[in-house]
Image (cartoon, helix red, strand yellow):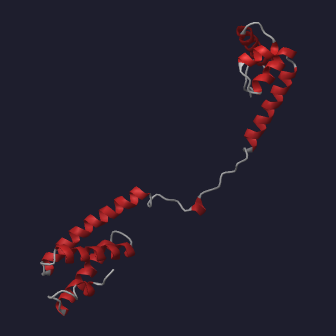
Amino acid sequence: MQKPSELHSSSSSSSPARAALLNKLRERIVGFAASRMQRDVAEDLAQEVLLLLHQKYGDIERLEELLPLSLKIVRFKMMAYRRKSQRRGETTSVPVEDVPLADPALDPLAAAEQRQLRERLVAAVSQLGERCRRLFALKLDGRRFADIQQILGAASINTVYTWDFRCRKELLDRLGGNWEQVR
């Protein structure tokens, strides 16, 4: 961006007094904005305000008129900057180094519970009859009830539903009446 003195160098009313006025105004704008936000952002906003003053309010010459106007503009620009950073999530972002990496493995307690449940299921299924073991194997293979009916040679699909219900009930009984292990 251009310096304040460069902004008005092409202007016909350019004078050392005008450059000094703009430098003084810039210092005040930066001081005001820096008291409320980071210094580098405050300098950027001050430069934007000076550019706006040059483009839209070039007819205003006196510091008494320019200072309140510039402070009002910089307040609006600061609010817009904060809204923009909030919208982008810049204020709530967490550095990547501070985020713990998730362990893809189960925690030891969950792994132990899963292993115990698997052992209980294998023991209970091994005590079931041949038809129930075969029915569960076909269901675990992803077969539909109509397919199971044909494979097992059942007369009706309702027979397969009944076998499934009875086998699940027997498995639940062999597990102690509860799918979860009671502690």
| Residue at 28% in and 66% down | 77
Instruction: Answer whether residue 45 is visible to the viewer in this image.
Output: yes
Q: Residue 175 location, x and y as percent?
A: 79, 21
Above or below: residue 30 compared with residue 101: below
| Residue at 26% in and 80% down | 26
Q: Residue 137 location, x and y as percent?
A: 81, 24
Above or below: residue 154 compared with residue 22: above
Q: Depth check: 67 or 143 in front? A: 143
Q: Residue 127 location, x and y as percent?
A: 87, 19
Q: Quadrant of the N terminus?
A: bottom left
Quarter of the figure with residue 134: top right
Q: Is residue 81 left or right of residue 174?
A: left
Number of residue marks? 0
| Residue at 27% in and 87% down | 6
Instruction: Answer whether residue 167 is visible to the viewer in this image.
Output: no
Q: Quadrant of the C terminus?
A: top right
Above or below: residue 137 compared with residue 34: above
Quarter of the figure with residue 109: top right
Above or below: residue 153 compared with residue 12: above
Q: Is residue 107 left or right of residue 51?
A: right
Q: Is residue 32 left or right of residue 119?
A: left
